[in-house]
Structures are given as C-alpha cells and as structure tokens.
Amino acid sequence: MPLSPHLVLVVALVLPGMGQVLNRQPVRGLIFAFFALLLGTFTFVTADPGVSWVGRLAGGIFVHLMAVLDAYRVARLRTGTIRAAGTR
C-alpha cells in the first residue's frame, strides 16, 4: 500500500532523496541526493565570498526542491489522488 503523500512530502523536505526511497525508488533517491550534494558543493566553492549562504548553496537547494516535488508527485500518483484530466 502506498504511503500518504503528505508523509512523503515531510520526509522529503527533511532528507534529500528519502521521499523517493519511501516511494520505492531508491536509485532515483540516491541520484537526487548525489546531485544535491554535488551541485551544493560546486556552488559553495565557486560563489563569491560575499554571497549569502543561500546563494552559496543554491545548486544543492534547487536539486533538493526538485526532489521534493518529484517525491510528492509520485506519491500522489500512486495513491490515486491525482484525477485524470476531465474526470470529476
């Protein structure tokens, strides 16, 4: 039985890639976590020292947010809470 989309959303917000693991997509979760770490490190190293911490981690934050949206979307699809177009 699929997990609640709201539970997946909360877990995905806290830990990058864990939403995908809860959705039974562990490889996809590891890929998201790897790229969040990689791009976060890259932007941290290459950003100007005067940039805020959000700007310095922008690459990792972006990937993390994409992982959250993906995990929530997949959880909603699996629970059937997204209706087909035109169906009410």
Image (cartoon, rainbow, N blue to C red):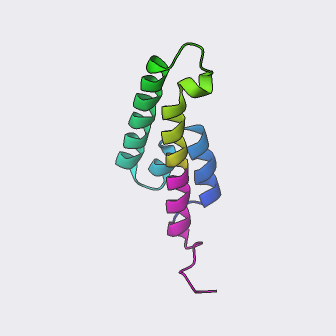
Residue 30 or residue 40, whichever sits in front: 40
Name the residue nearer the viewer: 25 or 51.
51
Question: Residue 41: in sight, yes or no?
Answer: yes
Residue 84 colored in magenta in the image: yes
- Image quarter for residue 51? top right
As drawn, the residue found furthest toward the top would be 49
Give the mark count: 0
Left/right placement of residue 20 relative to residue 72 reads left
Q: Is residue 33 above or below residue 53?
A: below
At x 50% / y 54%, what residue is drawn? 70
The x and y percentages for residue 57 are 53, 27
User: Does 21 appear above or below 73?
Assistant: above
> Is 87 placed left or right of 31 in the picture?
right
- What segment carries the magenta color? 69-88
In magenta stretch: residue 54: no
Residue drawn at the location 54% of the way across and 35% of the way down: 61
In percent of the image, x 38 and y 48: which residue is there? 28
